[in-house]
Amino acid sequence: MTEDTKFHHGDAQDQKPIIRMVDIQKHFGSVIALAGVSFDLKPGECHCLLGDNGAGKSTFIKTMSGVHKPTAGEIFFEDKPMHFEDPRDAIAAGIATVHQHLAMIPLMSVSRNFFMGNEPTRKVAGINFFDKKLADEITMEEMRKMGINLRGPDQAVGTLSGGERQTVAIARAVHFGAKILILDEPTSALGVRQTSNVLATIDKVRSQGVGVVFISHNVRHALAVGDRFTVLNRGQTLGTAKRGEISPEELQDLMAGGQELAELEGSLGGTV
Amino acid sequence: MAGSAQTASGDERIKEISPLRRALIRPELGGMVGTVAVFTFFLLFAFDSGMFTAQGVMNWSVVSAQFMIIAVGACLLMIAGEFDLSVGSMIGFAGMMIAIFSVTLSWPVWMAIIVTFALCVSIGAVNGYIVVRTGLPSFIVTLAFLFILRGFTIYLPQTIERKTIIGGIRDVAEGDWLASVFGGKVGQGFFVWLGDNGLIETFERGTRQGQPVVDGIPMLLIWALVIIIFGHVLLTKTKFGNWIFASGGDAEAARNSGVPVNRVKVLMFMFTAFCATVFATCQVMEFGSAGADRGLLKEFEAIIAVVIGGALLTGGYGSVLGAALGALIFGVVQQGLFFAGVESSLFRVFLGVILLGAVILNTYIRRIITGER
């Protein structure tokens, strides 16, 4: 570690992993997308999954969230072997994925988005009605906890900034009991301030004991919150490093596969 | 925390909104303004024409109610992110099936109605199933059904009866319990009382002398009211309503959150077909006949009413009450110009102007609400 950040980091070394993925392979026809990737996540830690485009990050997290079934390899969830048939299984087990763009519906209000698919109901005359009052109250409360002040629960998500939308999505996942939160490039489309907002949210969530898988190809964002770092390259793990054991330059080199970037860096003056 | 300084600065940038503005900023505003404008116009220019007597009110109410029934179906479907262009053909088809079952095949009318409902709602389900399974735009799939259903509506009576209109339904429907649910009238006693007390017009001569000219509220109006209330409650007060918004807003995001998007869409196609069949059944019971050209262009009139009512063509946003107001505007303008003695071709000009005005206003409001740029 070359610099210290303002985040307190989880000290989760002695805990048992929530999820352990051993030697995962995934083939799409003749293409080998994952050639044996191992990964584990402990409660209250932020494990960064780094890699360049095409390294297999997305395929790997889709395997974890039940979208793909691994061709070979095993998944242990809380020490029990798990086979997710579809994403709903994974969600039910407590694995929530927050996608960069596909998380929120801009035309709908924050509270309707927050409870989308999990609406609280209230019985009136034998008919189940959407309990909007309860939904609004919980939404306002959860947003306050995350440091977002809404004008009202009816405010449309479209009026929020990109960082705030990510935060709403994360708060939603945690509220509905996620044990593992997979964040798929949450910061790649955000500005500097919005990014720090999302990173702060990750930190809050981690302190509640949720394990966070943070996918990124930005080394600086990863180093700001990560406890461990796993680098993928061409479908394989290049190794896992603990916080403080690796420098940004080393990580960057690992992600790019070394050579070419080192040469480039000379001509760009260390700006990559 | 790094976030707290951030949000404090973000907070200053939320402007306070006055209560009046907040009350006005709603999806139905375009429809409300349009309704007020239309009524003001006709009160000023057609007040003496009989448009606002009991008979006149009943006249444009019935026409508006017809539009409302199909507009509510189209509205919910549009909010769920799909179109149904087969509504008009479905109206013709449903009416024809009732006629064939009850007149040609001599089934009891109640059975003809129930079988027709089952058949048409199933066709709606097929529409929806093809759309969600293939991922094709509903515009194309239902356009195909527009032709398929219209084709059958012309082919079947021609082959069976050698004509395109089947009459005689009123005779077979006489005394049928289900037929009266669609073609009957309610509140006759009340209207007789109104007539006796000189509050509404009565016939002055002929066999019905002394009876009120308007002798009850047609069941069509009751159906319109029930469907509007049902649609509005479903959309805004239930879990399923939230799923309708979510399915149309972003189907992928909704699926990621566990919303059964396909089921929602198929059910909305079925509901649209149901509304079209209600329309058709009321019409057949009123006219006593079914014609192969019934319901022509109704799909567009429904969509126009929905859009005047503030719904977004691409889905995820809209209001049932707005759609009902859009239908009211449609009905009042169509009948009002007739009462005002205006050349009927000007109806389209008038409608076009209202459509454009309401849609521009709606777009502006929607941008304020949703933060679209």
Image (tube, grey):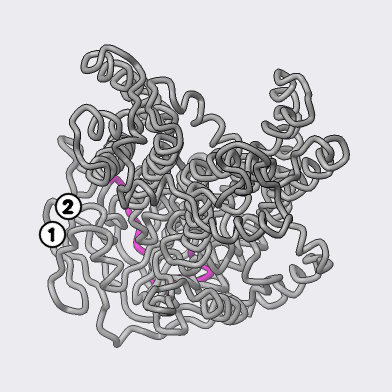
Q: Amino acid at mark 2?
A: Gln
Residue at disc 1, secondary structure: strand
Label 2 neighbour load within 10 Å: few <14, some 14-19, many 20+ = many
> Is B215 displayed left or right of B352 in the figure?
left
The furthest residue to the right: B44
Residues at marks 1 and 2, common chain? Answer: yes
Q: Disc 2 is attached to a residue of which chain?
A: A
- Residue range (magenta): A222-234
Query: Which one is in front, A62 or B183?
Result: B183
Residue at disc 2, secondary structure: strand
Q: Is residue A25 magenta?
A: no
| Residue located 36% across and 67% down the image | A96
Q: Disc 1 is attached to a residue of which chain?
A: A
| Mark closer to the chain start, 1 or 2 | 2
Q: Quadrant of the N terminus of chain B?
A: bottom right
* Place of residue B366 in the rendered image (x, y in percent of width and height, measured from the top left): 68, 49
Query: Which one is in front, A192 or A220?
Result: A192
* Place of residue A197 in the rendered image (x, y in percent of width and height, measured from the top left): 61, 68
Query: Which one is in front, A3 or B96?
Result: B96
Q: Amino acid at mark 1?
A: Gly
Q: Which residue is mark 1?
A: A73
Q: Which residue is mark 2?
A: A25
Q: Which image quadrant is residue B8 in?
A: bottom right
